[in-house]
Image (cartoon, rainbow, N blue to C red):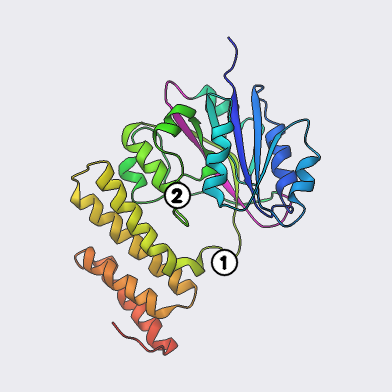
Amino acid sequence: MSLPLISVIIPAYNAEAYIEETLESVLEQDYSNLEIIVVNDGSTDNTLKILNNYQDKITVFDITNSGVSYARNYAVKHAKGDWLAFIDADDLWNPDKLSKQYEQLNGHLWSHCNSYYIGEEQSGKVTRLDLSEQSGGSIFEKLILENFITTSTILIDKQTFIDAGGFDEKLAALEDWKLWLDIAFKHPISYVEQPVAKYRVYQGSTSRKARKMLPLHLAVIEHAFTKNVSNNHSLKKLAQEKSYTICSYLAEDAGDSRFALHCAWHAMNIGRFKLLLVKRFVRTLLNSVKNKPNITF
C-alpha cells in the first residue's frame, strides 16, 4: 500500500542562519512520499538565495511580507498532499519524525509529538526536554490551560485543517493555540511520546511580551468557549487565572513590576484567593516594593 503524500510547510522570514539546517532535517526524513513547500515571507537577508540552491528538491513561493499565519495558509492552498506537516524555519526534525507520527495515527486526524528544546547555536544541541504536560486523546480541557503543542510537532489531515479555518491571520500571536483548540474540541489527537522534534528557544524571547500577550490570551480563551459552546464556566475561569499568572511571571522577568502585580492581583481574584495565588501576589508585591516602582491599581 502506497504512502499518502505529506506536504511539509515552512514559512521563512530572514531565516538565513538556520534555514539550511532545517531543510536538511526535512530532506533526511525516512518517510518517502513528501513535498516540501517553503514560503519566503519577504525576507531581506539571504534566505531566498539559500532556498534557490534547493530548487530541484523543494517548491519555493516568494511573497511580500505578510506574517507567518498568511505564509502558512498560502502554502496550504498550494499543497498537493492529503496531509500537512509544519516546521518553522529554525526548528529541526529527527529523521523518523514523520514516519513515527504516521505509523501511530491509529485512525486519528491529527498528531503531535514530544520535543526537545535547543539553543540559538547552529549545532542543534539539546538544552532540555520539553517538560510541559503532553498527551493524546481528547485534550481540549488540558490545552485550554496550557498551549503545549508547538507547530513544528504537528501532522494533520489537510481537510481537517481547512474545515477549522486555518491560522487566524488577524492575530499577532497565539494563532496556533486558537486553531489547535478549535480542532481539539472536535477531534482527539494522536501523541508520539518519543521526542522526534527540536524546538529552538531564544534568550529573552518571551519575557518582553507580557503586556501584548495578556489580551491575546484572554481573547483566545473567550473564542474557544464561545465558538465551541462550552458551558464549563469553572474551566474558563481556571484558564483565565492561568493566563494572568503566566503573564505575571513574564512581566516580572522583564522587570515590569507594575504589570506583574496587576496580573498577579487578577489571578488571585479569579482564583478566589487560593493560597498559592495569594503567596504569588504577596511575593510579587514585595519584589515590586524592593524595586521601588510607582505602584498603582
77 with respect to 44 (left or right): left
Q: Is residue 118 magenta?
A: yes
Q: What amino acid is found at the position of numbered circle 1 in the picture?
A: Gly
Q: Nearer the viewer, residue 38 or 291?
A: 38
Q: With respect to residue 250, does 191 lie above or below?
A: above
In this rendering, the answer to whether 183 lies above or below 239 is above
Checking the image for residue 175, the label placed there is 2
Residue appearing at x 33%, y 58% in the figure: 218
Query: Which quadrant does the C terminus fall into?
Result: bottom left
Establish if 293 lies above or below 273.
below
Q: Residues within 10 Å of mark 1 (few under 14, many from 20)?
A: few
Q: Nearer the viewer, residue 284 or 250?
A: 250
Q: Residue furthest top?
A: 1
To which quarter of the image does residue 289 belong? bottom left
* Residue at 57% across, 19% down: 4
Q: Can you tell which mark lies on residue 246?
A: none
**Mark 1 falls on what kind of element?**
loop
Quadrant the N terminus occupies: top right
The reply, left or right, for residue 97 in relation to residue 239 is right
Residue placed at 71% from the left, 47% from the top? 19
The spot of residue 279 in percent (x, y) is 30, 72
Q: Nearer the viewer, mark 2 or mark 1?
A: 2
Q: Magenta segment range?
A: 105-123
Q: Is residue 27 visible?
A: yes
Q: Identity of the amino acid at label 2? A: Glu
Q: Position of residue 211 (x, y in %)?
A: 42, 69
The reply to whether dot 2 and dot 1 touch (C-beta < 8 Å) is no
Question: Camera-side residue: 167 or 106?
Answer: 167
Q: Residue at label 1? A: 204
Q: Residue 206 location in percent, x, y?
A: 51, 63
